[in-house]
Amino acid sequence: MSHHVQAHPDRQLRYVTAEPFYQPVGSEVGVFMAAWSRRLPVMLKGPTGCGKTRFLEHMAWRLKRPLITVSCHEDLTSSDLVGRFLIEGDATVWQDGPLTRAVREGAICYLDEIVEARTDTTVVIHPLTDHRRHLPIDKLGTEIAAHPDFLLVISYNPGYQTVLKDLKPSTKQRFVGMNFSYPSPAVESGIVMKEAGIDTRRSARLVEAAARARNLRDQGLQEVTSTRALVYAGTLMAAGLEPMEAVEAAIVSPQTDDVELASALREIFQAFFPD
Amino acid sequence: MPAQTEEILEHLDAISFVAGRDARAALPAVGHLGDSACLRYLEAGRDLFFYDREAGKAFFHATPDLVRAFGGLEPWLDQSRIFLTQRGTFRAAVGYFGQAAAVREHFGPEGEKLWYGLGSEWIPRHVDSAAAYFQMPVATLVGAFPVGELERLVAPARELASGRPGLATYLEGAVRVRAICGLDGIAEWAWRGKDVLAAGRIRGEAWYRLESDEARSFVLDMLPGFHLGPHRRLFTLLLQAWTGLALPFEDGAWSMEGGRAFLETDGRSLFVPAVMPDREEAILALYHTGAHLAFGSYDQDAIHALFREIGMEHPPLDPGQRITWRPLFARFGGDLLRFQLVFDLCEDLRVDAAMECRMPGYLDRILAAASRQPVPAGAAGAYWKEAVRFLDDCLRGTVDEDLKPLLSPGAGILESFRVALGRYATTALPAITMAERPAAFLPGHSPNAARPVYPRHGGAAVPVDLDDVAPPGASGPREKPREIPQQADGSDADLEIPPEDLQGRGGRVGVGIPIPAKANGSGRGVKGPAGGCPYPEWDYRQQRYKEGWARVHERKLAERDGIRAMAIASEYEGTLRRLKKALQAQKPARMAPLRRQYDGDEPDIDAAVQFVVERRAGHSPRSSIYRQRRPQRRDTAVLLLADLSTSIMAEAGDTGVRVVDRLRAAMMLFGEALMEVGDPFALYGFASKYHHEVLLYPIKRFEDQFDSQVRAVLGGLSGRLATRMGAAVRHATRQMVRNPAHHRLLLILSDGRPADYDDGGDPRYLQEDTRMALREAQDHGVHAFCISLDPGGGEYLPRVFGQGHYLVLSHIDHLPARLPEIYLRLRGHA
């Protein structure tokens, strides 16, 4: 028992050094700062590509805290989060999982798309999310108290695929919820312009067209045109593609295989980018 | 006069006074041709008269014209002998003699020879056909085509010989088909008709007369131009994208035989013609009509203001509660069309300018489309040019001073009316006739006040219905004449409902004054059947449950149709095969070994290593170090709950396809797919008649096999009654809770909003109840998802089911293939 050592204790946590561009659209920065000041866990909800991850990167940079991101998937077990024993030479070595590491060292731990993980996995985070702020590690027989700067953030996309995979209400209630959606046209246009490096005219048109395309939400599109898709389209334009080529590549073909839907999207963008 | 001639004339006198008289009367026209010619002529006349009195009379009567047209007796005298070869040819003969002269004059000797030849060949074959041919006015027969093409018109009919249906039936349709689709269309139409004829005489004849829907739709398919039918989904999508409106599309009144194709609306549906000249014009028409809808041409308040302007307190309504425009124009009397067009010009400018702000380049597109067409001639051209000038000026910002109010953001139809009145007083635009009017509109534009309209409330959303006249259970606007619902188990036909309850919609009495809907109409003590499971119902107005208000009865569906089930199976064989293949391709994933088992065929290396490590570290880890290879049991159970209300018997927009047809196929494919997947599933249908008789039809319970019995029931599905969804959801939830699966999915398939005969015309009542029922289901661990066919579903589905818990399928044809796919996606593939 005595020969447990930390595996790679010197491996550096990731700090966000350069400021990630993030354009606040509402009070989200204030809400997050307040939650942070009281170390309340945060839940980011919103559709794909609306800036959840970017927001968090930005906040990590602002708070100067390291950020550990875990993309959750169906086979993610609790030991993937908490840690496991490894054999090193003749000894067994305990290796902290990402969550444990964040808890010990006071990082922001971001569990992206938490609903994808198995439900038993989500249970291990419960003690971290209330006043106890500790993480029990069965295999070590210990409980570690969270570093004062530790913060847990989860995200999920309340979309169509997740009907069967909703978070349990008991889990949800432990978080400060923040809703994200696509920004207002003026803000979104600014974002696209800055991120993609295109002129105002083109970014404004992309955004206007996207507003129309987003009306198609219930018509078989699983995800509507995201800000990220617009940025991609803008980036491709900046890289020299014709506007409609860029739209086709970054928006139409990734979004749908449905012929009529694709032709509707094309028709919408075409109105803003006539040849 | 030679003796022989005299002899023939006497002979004719002897058999009939008329014969002698007519022959003598005709003789002078022939006299100058010489004696032998005269004799030949009279012999032919006599033979004809002996053979058939009517034919003979026609012969003598037509003689002067024929001789003049042909310049003699050749070749018509010889031609006329053909009528002596068969019995009963007199009608053909009358037709021939009546028209031959005109044919010769118009089409020359060759044309006449062809015309005669094509008709006469039918005399030995089928006398009635020959009669139909010769009697058809030759102008109609030849139409706008060269006479030489007659051969191509008639030739396909030879194939149909042996008497039925004969030219009589064929020609009439063929001439119309030729006018619509050109000569190339005829052969195809006739060829297809042969198959139809083989299937049944009556059906075949209806085809050739163009009386049946199948013939009409076939012809429409062949029409040149842009067919809107296959693109309706695109149009739905575009309308929704640009205006946020989800309106159903219906077939427009536009007939096949011409006139300009317009896309119109009554404020509630879009009426689309089968064909428009090209895609651009169709799309512009959609945008323009969408602009009218989005920018308030049919806003109730604006229309009321408009009628106040002319001194009427309320606009007049027709029996369907639609506003009729007539009084607006009545005062212009004979000059009504001119004012209407001026009004259209102003109103079109207003909405087009507003649309331009939303869609840059829109006006350019209209102008470009207009410039590709010639300016129409006559009066229509003046209006056309004026419309072009308006739009041009609008683009350049140089509109006439009096038009400027139309461009201000707050302008409405009232401003257009005022501006139009001002313009009309001074306009130089010419008077125009009804026939010229259609040409006066730019591409995509159409008369605005063409139909009575359902006023719209506050612009965007379709009114959630107070003035809906459709029976409950229907999604209002899509209601169409429908099949008489079948009787299920003898106790629940629509017919048993007292007629006064069919109106349970609040309704409007008098002129345009909405009467508040009375809640929970029926309290009339109608007794439902005994028994059933009582369920509470949520009354949102009181914010409380009405305990035991709804009673659910489980019934078996009696109708079975194994043959139709097989037909559906074969129709969708390809889809099913693809589906199964896709599922099998996923099988390796599904067969994935179960990891970390306590026993199994092989060690789980990861688990084993961890076990050893933890043992060494001094722990006593769990010995779950095996892998098992066995089909993984899916942990999802699904109950498909299908709305079987009357509205599923309605046609779903496109030709002849009813909702129920696709529903049967969809449920069948769903069952087949689920068999392949192996998830536990159940199929239920539901309908309702008042709160005490909600009917749930178990088609396949969880424990039942999906066998030919179940398939036959699916094949025999039919619609009945209304849609009390909340109670059905509660009952289905109770069935699901019994199932031990980890995930439970309640998949609801519906074509309209919840409604029942006793909902008092308040659509919100049952929607709120459904919402509560779904919330209860959620509390029991049952997740619900709704697949709706209601194009207006976007208005209430988010409220009832919650964002992301529903999907509107705009195209019913996609349902069978999409349903299993949606389920698989919901359930997660891995």
Image: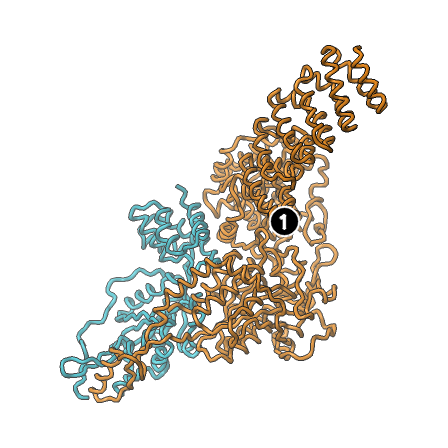
Chain colours: A cyan, B orange
Which quadrant holds residue B643? bottom right
How busy is the neighbourhood of tag 1: few (under 14 within 10 Å), some, or many (20 plus)? few
> Is B811 situated above or below A127?
above
Q: Is residue A229 in view from this perspective?
A: yes
Q: Specify whether A98 is left or right of B251.
A: left
Residue drawn 62% across the image and 48% down it:
B213
Check the residue under mark 1 and report the chain it is in: B
Q: Give left or right: position of A170 versus B595.
A: right
The picture places residue B75, in percent across and down from the top left corner, at 66, 19
> Which quadrant would residue A191 be assigned to in this image?
bottom left
Of the pair B820 and A89, the residue shown nearer to us: B820
In the picture, residue B29 is in which quadrant? Answer: top right
Which part of the image, by quadrant, shows the N terminus of chain B?
A: top right
**On screen, B675 above or below A260?**
below
Judging depth in this view, the residue of B215 and A226 nearest the camera is B215
- On screen, residue A129 versus residue B230, left or right, reads left
The answer to whether residue A259 is above or below residue A16 is above
* Residue B54 image offset from top left, x and y in percent: 78, 28
Circle 1 sits on which residue? B200
Percent coordinates x, y for residue A45 in the rendering: 40, 68
How many numbered dots are placed on residues in this image? 1
Give me the residue at 55% from left, 78% from top.
Answer: B734
Q: Amino acid at mark 1?
A: Gly
Q: Secondary structure at mark 1?
A: loop
Taking the image as drawn, is residue A134 in sight? no
Which residue is drawn at the image coordinates 59% and 57% (left, top)?
B658
Can you say which quadrant of the picture contains the C terminus of chain B?
bottom left
**Residue B146 placement (x, y as % from top left):** 57, 27
